[in-house]
Amino acid sequence: MDKKEKGFNLKLYAAAAFFAVLAALVLITVFTFKTKYTAYHPEEVARNYVDTVVQTGDGYNAYKNALISKSQKYGDFIRTYYMNPVIYRDTAYKPGDDIKDCGYKGFNDESYMGEKSKNDDGSLQGQVIDTMYDYYVKLVTDGWDDYDTIFTKYFAKLVEVRKEVFGDDYMTDEIMFTALEGNVLKYGQSLTGTEDEFDKNTGNQTSFKSIGAYQKAYGEDYKFTTAVKTEKNMDLAAYKAALPTEKLTTYGVQADDISAVKCYTVTVSTEDGKTVTETDVVVAQIKNSWYADNTATDTSALYGFYK
C-alpha cells in the first residue's frame, strides 16, 4: 500500500467524499447493466465475478452478481441486516421490520444532530472517511468472503469514529454508504494508482498522481485480463445438501430453487499472457439466470497476489 498522505486537507477531503459517492453511483449503473447481460451465461458470470474483484480489489460490488443479490437489491440487503440494526439499535428492530410503519425512532432522527452535523460542508464527513480507511483495509486484507464480519465491524467502528469527529450520535444509511463506498474507492486507487484531476467548475485539484501497488508490481501500463480456463463437474444433490440454509434465507433463496450448478476456474493474466493468480468460482442457476455462489467461492487468492 502507498504511504498515507501527509497532512489533512479539509477541502480536498470534502471534494473527495463527494466524488467517492459519484463514482459509486456510476459503478452501480455499470454493474447493473453487466449483471442483466451476463446472467444467462454461467461462464461469463464466473469471469465477471473475478474481474470485478481483481481490477480494483472490489469484493463489495462483486456481490451484485451473486446469490446475495438474487431476491432484493444489494443496497436493501445491507440496510436491512447491517445498517438498520445500527440506526435503530435502541429499539426492538429486527431485520425485515417495516421501519416506516413500526414507529421506531432511530439515530437518523434530526433530534440527534449536533451543530457540527447541521453545519458540515462535507469536510468533517471527509475526515470520517479518511479515518475509517485503515480500518477498512485491515478488514478486507483477505477478501470480502466473510461480508458479515466486515459489515458488522465496519459500521460499529463508524459509529465510534463519527461520534469522535462530530460529537453526536446522528447516523443515517447515507452516511454509512458514503463512508464505505469512499473507502472502497480509495482502496481501489491504492492498487491502480491515480492521476492529477481538477474540478472543472472550481479548478480545485481533487486527486493527485500516485503509483498504485499493481503498477509497482507490473509496471505503470499494466493490464489484467480474466478468462475461464476450465469447467469442473459438480454433483447437484451434494451441492444443495451442503448449502447454508440460514444464510440463504436472508437472500430469499432456497436450495430447491437451484436447478443446476457449475464450477469454473478463472485465471487472471497480465497483457503478455503471464498468469498472476486464479480461483474457482461456483455458479448456481435459478430459473433462467446464473449467480456466483458467494457462500461456496473463495476469493482470497484475488487479494495480495501482487506482493
Image (spheres, rainbow, N blue to C red):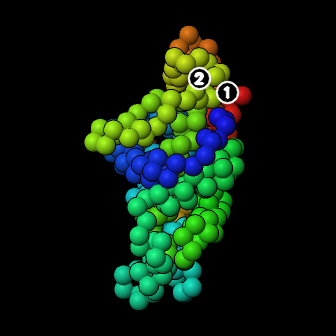
Q: Is residue 10 above or below residue 141?
A: below
Q: Can you say which quadrant of the picture contains the C terminus?
A: top right
Image location of residue 222, percent across then percent down = 54, 18
Residue underneath mark 1: 306
Residue underneath mark 2: 215
Q: 10 Å neighbourhood of mark 1: few (<14), some, or many (≥20)? A: some
Q: Nearer the viewer, residue 171 or 162?
A: 162
- Residue drawn at the location 51% of the way across and 20% of the way down: 223
Q: Nearer the viewer, residue 106 or 283?
A: 106
Q: Nearer the viewer, residue 71 or 2?
A: 2
SS at mark 2 in the image: helix
Q: Amino acid at mark 1?
A: Tyr
Q: Amino acid at mark 2?
A: Gln
Q: Toward which corner of the image does residue 147 lie, by quadrant? A: bottom right
- Residue drawn at the location 36% of the way across and 81% of the way down: 100
- Residue drawn at the location 59% of the way across and 17% of the way down: 219
